[in-house]
Image: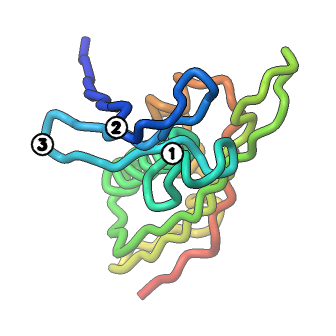
């Protein structure tokens, strides 16, 4: 069993009227490696200045964690199959809408990975799709959520 931790810190320093919902949602996420990330509610949910556009919001972090887990799983699958991945980029997008229970949720995440391979052994499009499918099956985060996660890989570049 593995355990993962994050420390969140928020303080009511703005001197606004908390009981009337006038308080900053800006806070920080601290991780065990020592990095601190500025965080906030999404400006799409709580308007600026109560939110910060410069900070990571939970919805963005959710999408990023799914995309990151998929990428790490994909790289492992590709290496296991003997391919050399030169680069991997993904412009992942999450959609918030009402779920089956009528609650707002990130109901789907679309991954749009673009990979570049090099070397003598290059995957064809069927092999690329198979690797993304296997990566999805292996991704711990994808296995942990109810949201539909779809993967739309772009064509690969080979050298």
Label 3 crowd bin: few (<14), some (14–19), many (20+), radius 10 Å: few
Say which quarter of the image contains residue 101.
top right
Q: Secondary structure at mark 2?
A: loop
Residue 40 point in image, percent of width and height: 47, 44
Q: Which mark is residue 90?
A: none
- Quadrant of the rendering where the N terminus is positioned: top left
Residue on which disc 3 sits: 34
Residue on which disc 1 sits: 57
Which residue lies at the image location 48% right of the left edge and 68% below the top edge? 89
Q: How many numbered circles does the render carry?
A: 3
Residue 125 point in image, percent of width and height: 63, 67
Q: CA distance from mark 1 to mark 2?
A: 20 Å
Residue on which disc 2 sits: 13
Which residue lies at the image location 33% right of the left edge and 69% below the top edge? 84
Q: Nearer the viewer, residue 8 or 82?
A: 8
Q: CA distance from mark 1 to mark 3?
A: 19 Å
Residue projecting furthest to the bottom: 159
The answer to which of marks 1 and 2 sits earlier in the sequence is 2
Q: Nearer the viewer, mark 2 or mark 3?
A: 2
120 sits to left or right of 96:
left
- Quadrant of the rendering where the C terminus is positioned: bottom left
Say which quarter of the image contains residue 69.
top left
Q: Nearer the viewer, residue 3 or 38?
A: 38
149 sits to left or right of 123:
right
The answer to which of marks 2 and 3 sits earlier in the sequence is 2
């Amino acid at each position: 069993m593995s355990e993962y931790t994050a420390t969140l810190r928020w303080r009511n320093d703005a001197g606004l009227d908390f009981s009337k919902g006038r308080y900053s949602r800006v806070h920080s996420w601290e991780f065990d490696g020592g990095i601190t990330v500025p965080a906030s509610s999404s400006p799409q949910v709580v308007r600026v200045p109560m939110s910060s556009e410069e900070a990571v919001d939970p919805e963005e972090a959710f999408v990023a964690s799914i995309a990151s887990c998929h990428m790490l799983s994909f790289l492992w699958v590709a290496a296991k199959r003997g391919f050399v991945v030169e680069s991997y980029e993904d412009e992942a997008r999450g959609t918030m809408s009402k779920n089956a229970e009528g609650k707002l949720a990130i109901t789907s995440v679309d991954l749009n990975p673009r990979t570049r391979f090099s070397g003598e052994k290059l995957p064809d499009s069927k092999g690329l799709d198979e690797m993304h499918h296997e990566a999805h099956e292996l991704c711990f985060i994808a296995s942990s959520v109810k949201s539909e996660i779809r993967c739309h890989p772009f064509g690969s570049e080979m050298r």
